[in-house]
């Protein structure tokens, strides 16, 4: 029989063994200096910036935060990935400073919540993206019109084979296998709005990959009749296993590319990516500097993360938006 | 009380001798029985093999895929989007370890306390005690995302209003795994022979003294097993943490109450696995290896403690 005196040792033993190990390593952790701008660091600004929202935009914001922190080590930026909708939910509750978004804020459901909680904001463009419709390299079809996409993805679509799509530019008789993001995704919202004319409406019998667009890559690469859509960076990383369809928005076939998105010819699937800083957060010098930095260094940020940079015009407009919100 | 002991050389020899005697007198076993015996043994072996093969495949894939990123930078460096070659999981690792420490501090007293009450004090002929019992068993099967919603509504916001802090994540995880600890601890307490209790009570000890000095020490290995299972589940949970505020990009070491956010290993691994760039997928695989190492280290520690306090009657 074990000595009873040893028992308490064990009782806390298991519990604390790890506790010690873990807590020991946080001695050097910085304790948050909540939103203060009076930091005595060499580089001026300090404080915390909480960003949450779209997982598509997150890599951009992370890159921006990293570059910004190199110059301003006293600023702590965190980036969450709750999705565009989840991000706005927290943003409008006043729980985050900046919300990442791959679609504009929803007038019907999100704007009223922000208004009710007194959260004022502006939409700031930070990058461009091309929603890319991809297929298997074996597929001879090169171009799809918006109408053809609607035939395939429409809410009442029953199509099960490529041969059922009307007016294709090549003969193809394979079973359609559809891959797309989950309904929480801003990408889903944008695509359904552009192709089916109504946000959030799409046929239900597709392979829903949720937030994992790499599953679309694997799925389409493995199915001759596969079709899927996602952000341009996923195509850029997989040009050897996938082909991107040119899109005909009414003015001829246009392949997704940096130029086509920037000059606006890749319609309707060229899209802007946004951040939504709140007016209150912009009163904090750190947040203001961070947002300006984000826009100024957009070329480096977009190229590091596989997105399409903004045009001069967009940069100027974003700066103006931030200035007016910060000043107002 | 004679507990089962593994056969020694001596008993093995005795069994073999007895079997040989029986065979000599009655003739060897019928052929069908021998075949059935072998088939059964083969099936059991196959079950073990399949379980191990799954684990081995997972490990091998993670190690092979993550190999380019394996290195000390995994534990010393924060995540990076620009400089992926030198990126690491430091804040996520510290976040996960701290959370696990809090989870253990919460679940050991609560889980063991509840188990002692239900086994030693509660009158299970009463309907409310049976209802509690049934509910605990059901809670163990509730999907983790439900606990995430609970954590968001009651701990992060709502009544407790802690905000998106690490401690809120730890409390949510503790609630999630508490039923496992309670159930395992109850089994362990129930397995203590009644003669031990009766002997103690007969010698004039109170119920508390009996529980504290006889039952609990004897139940420790079983309780420890429950805690190990619970902690292993807690460290790998992603879904509830996403809801209660664990983020992906944290470059500083998190603190339990720090309002600037925290990260956890599974959350960061999950996010990296869904990125387009191959470097991130490599990082995700390396993160899986790191998490397995942490898990194995923790479990070995717990098993060592368990064996140290193992009871023999």
Image (cartoon, coloured by chain):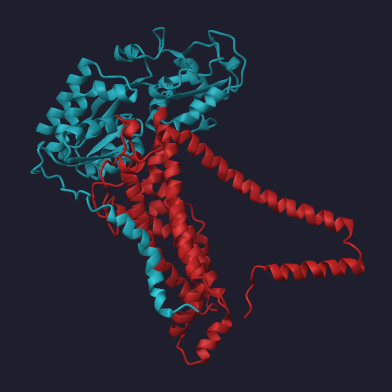
Q: Nearer the viewer, residue A55 or A124?
A: A55
**Residue A214: percent from the left, percent from the top?**
46, 30
Q: Quadrant of residue A58?
A: top left
Q: What residue is rendered at 43% in x and 79% in y?
A: A4
Q: Quadrant of residue A44?
A: top left
The answer to whether residue B12 is above or below residue B42 is: below
Q: Nearer the viewer, residue A143 or B200?
A: B200
- Is residue A199 something that shows in the picture? no
The answer to whether residue B23 is above or below residue B80 is: below
Q: Quadrant of the C terminus of chain B?
A: bottom right
Q: Nearer the viewer, residue A324 or B212?
A: B212
**Residue A325: percent from the left, percent from the top?**
14, 32
Q: What residue is rendered at 40% in x and 13% in y?
A: A249
Chain A as rendered: colour: cyan
Q: What residue is rendered at 48% in x and 68% in y?
A: B308
Q: Is residue B34 left or right of residue B188?
A: right
Q: Is residue A42 left or right of residue B243?
A: left
Chain B as rendered: colour: red
Q: What residue is rendered at 86% in x and 69% in y?
A: B22
Q: Is residue A149 left or right of residue B25?
A: left
The answer to whether residue A301 is above or below residue B43 is: above
- Is residue B283 something that shows in the picture? yes
**Residue A245: percent from the left, percent from the top?**
46, 14
Q: Is residue A95 left or right of residue B292?
A: left
Q: Nearer the viewer, residue B276 or A323?
A: B276
The answer to whether residue B298 is above or below residue A286 is: below
**Residue A309: percent from the left, percent from the top?**
28, 19
């Amino acid at each position: 029989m074990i000595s009873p005196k040893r028992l308490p040792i064990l009782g806390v033993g298991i519990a604390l063994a790890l506790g010690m190990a873990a807590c020991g390593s946080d001695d050097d952790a910085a304790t948050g200096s909540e939103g203060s701008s009076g930091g005595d660091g060499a580089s001026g600004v300090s404080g915390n910036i909480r960003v949450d929202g779209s997982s598509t935009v997150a890599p951009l914001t992370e890159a921006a935060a990293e570059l910004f922190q190199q110059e301003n080590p006293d600023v702590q930026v965190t980036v969450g990935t709750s999705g565009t909708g989840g991000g706005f939910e927290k943003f409008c509750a006043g729980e985050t400073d900046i919300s990442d978004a791959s679609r504009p804020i929803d007038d019907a459901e999100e704007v009223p919540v922000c208004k009710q909680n007194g959260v004022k904001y502006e939409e700031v463009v930070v990058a461009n993206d091309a929603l890319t419709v991809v297929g298997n390299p074996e597929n001879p079809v090169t171009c799809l019109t918006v109408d053809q996409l609607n035939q395939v993805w429409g809410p009442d679509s029953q199509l099960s084979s490529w041969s059922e799509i009307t007016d294709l530019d090549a003969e193809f008789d394979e079973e359609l296998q559809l891959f797309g993001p989950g309904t929480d995704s801003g990408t889903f919202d944008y695509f359904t709005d552009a192709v089916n004319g109504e946000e959030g409406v799409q046929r239900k019998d597709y392979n829903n990959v949720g937030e994992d667009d790499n599953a679309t890559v694997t799925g389409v690469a493995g199915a001759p009749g596969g079709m899927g859509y996602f952000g341009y960076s996923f195509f850029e990383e997989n040009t050897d296993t996938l082909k991107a369809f040119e899109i005909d928005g009414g003015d001829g076939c246009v392949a997704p590319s940096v130029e086509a998105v920037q000059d606006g010819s890749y319609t309707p699937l060229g899209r802007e990516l946004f951040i939504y800083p709140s007016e209150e957060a912009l009163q904090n010098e750190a947040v203001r500097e961070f947002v300006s930095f984000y826009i100024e260094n957009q070329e480096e940020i977009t190229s590091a993360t596989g997105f399409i940079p903004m045009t001069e015009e967009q940069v100027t407009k974003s700066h103006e938006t931030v200035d007016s919100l910060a000043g107002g | 009380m004679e507990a089962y002991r593994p056969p020694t050389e001596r008993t093995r020899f005795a069994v073999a001798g007895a079997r040989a005697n029986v065979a000599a007198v009655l003739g060897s076993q019928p052929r069908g029985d021998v075949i059935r015996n072998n088939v059964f043994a083969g099936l059991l072996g196959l079950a073990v093999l399949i379980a191990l093969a799954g684990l081995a495949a997972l490990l091998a894939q993670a190690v092979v895929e993550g190999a380019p990123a394996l290195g000390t930078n995994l534990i010393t460096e924060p995540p990076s989007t620009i400089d992926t070659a030198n990126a690491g999981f430091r804040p996520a690792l510290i976040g996960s370890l701290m959370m696990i420490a809090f989870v253990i501090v919460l679940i050991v007293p609560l889980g063991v306390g509840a188990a002692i009450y239900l086994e030693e004090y509660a009158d299970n002929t009463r309907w409310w005690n049976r209802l509690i019992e049934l509910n605990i068993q059901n809670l163990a099967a509730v999907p983790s995302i439900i606990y995430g919603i609970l954590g968001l509504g009651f701990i992060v916001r709502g009544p407790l209003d802690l905000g998106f802090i690490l401690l809120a994540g730890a409390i949510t995880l503790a609630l999630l795994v508490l039923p496992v600890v309670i159930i395992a601890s109850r089994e362990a307490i129930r397995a203590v022979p009644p003669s031990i209790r009766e002997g103690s009570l007969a010698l004039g000890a109170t119920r508390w003294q009996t529980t504290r000095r006889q039952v609990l020490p004897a139940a420790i290995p079983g309780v420890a097993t429950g805690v190990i299972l619970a902690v292993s589940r807690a460290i790998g949970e992603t879904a509830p943490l996403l809801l209660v505020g664990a983020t992906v990009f944290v470059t500083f070491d998190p603190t339990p109450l720090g309002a600037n956010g925290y990260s956890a290993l599974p959350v960061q691994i999950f996010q990296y696995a869904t990125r387009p760039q191959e470097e991130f997928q490599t990082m995700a695989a390396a993160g899986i290896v790191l998490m397995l190492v942490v898990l194995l280290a923790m479990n070995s520690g717990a098993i060592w403690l368990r064996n140290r306090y193992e009871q023999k009657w």
